[in-house]
Amino acid sequence: MLGTVLPHAAAIAASPLPVVAVILILMSPRARTRGLVFLAGWFLGVVVATGFFAWLREVLPSTDSTPAGTIIRVMQILVGVGLLWLGWRQWRTRPAPGATPTTPPWMNRVDTLPAVTTGALAFALSAVTPKNLLVAASAGTELGTLDAASPELWVAVALFAMLASVTVLIPVLLVIVAPSPSRRALTRIRDWLTANSAVIMTALFLLVGAHIIITGISAL
């Protein structure tokens, strides 16, 4: 079951924005504490978003019936179409060659936010942003074939969230284990991700959207 949602976890994990945000946090005062809080918020956001859609599938009437199963697959196809549209929009609004990529206004203040606000920001980035919400919806409907009352479902959701959090986890661990060397490497990674964010996000939207559409169509 977990294998079917690995592309979804990779799509969430490969988002440049949270990685850049956590790197900025890890270069600020109280880096370890605030980095761990950001990681916890990100993980919890993925759990809540994915778990909600898994539960939602469970409460749909007669999910094993053909009409209900068709509705779920059509919903997945629509999610895939939404991701393709986001990919097109991301590419159309990309910075011109040689232009400095723009960043969200909050990014300029992320290294000064209190720890609690940092966690709330991470939760919002993982659970509420359009791309992650659509991906979590698709993953949740896949995992929702498991019984909502069974621990197996929530273990699967937790494992999915762990995989989706790995790119946030690694910088935090690097700063804890080797603060000075890791900061130099993380600075280079941050600069590269910022410069190539539009291309990365476009590729993610298109690949994951196409995967979800193909999976949904093949299951009809």
Image (cartoon, rainbow, N blue to C red):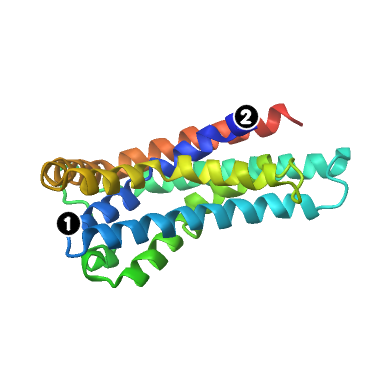
Residue 187: give x, y in percent of width and height: 15, 46
Q: Can residue 96 be seen in this view?
A: no
Residue 5: give x, y in percent of width and height: 58, 35
Query: Among all residues in the image, which is located at the extreme front?
Result: 177
What residue sits right under mark 1 in the picture?
27
Disc with the residue nearer the chain's start (1 vs 2)? 1
Tell which of 173 and 119 is nearer to you: 173
Element type at marker 1?
loop
Determine the residue positioned at 72% across, 55% down. Answer: 56
Q: How far apart are marks 1 and 2 (CA)?
A: 41 Å
Give the quarter of the image for residue 120.
bottom left
Is mark 1 in CB contact (under 8 Å) with mark 2?
Answer: no
What residue sits right under mark 2 in the picture?
214
Tell me the kind of residue under disc 1.
Met
Determine the residue positioned at 11% across, 43% down. Answer: 184
Give the quarter of the image for residue 214.
top right
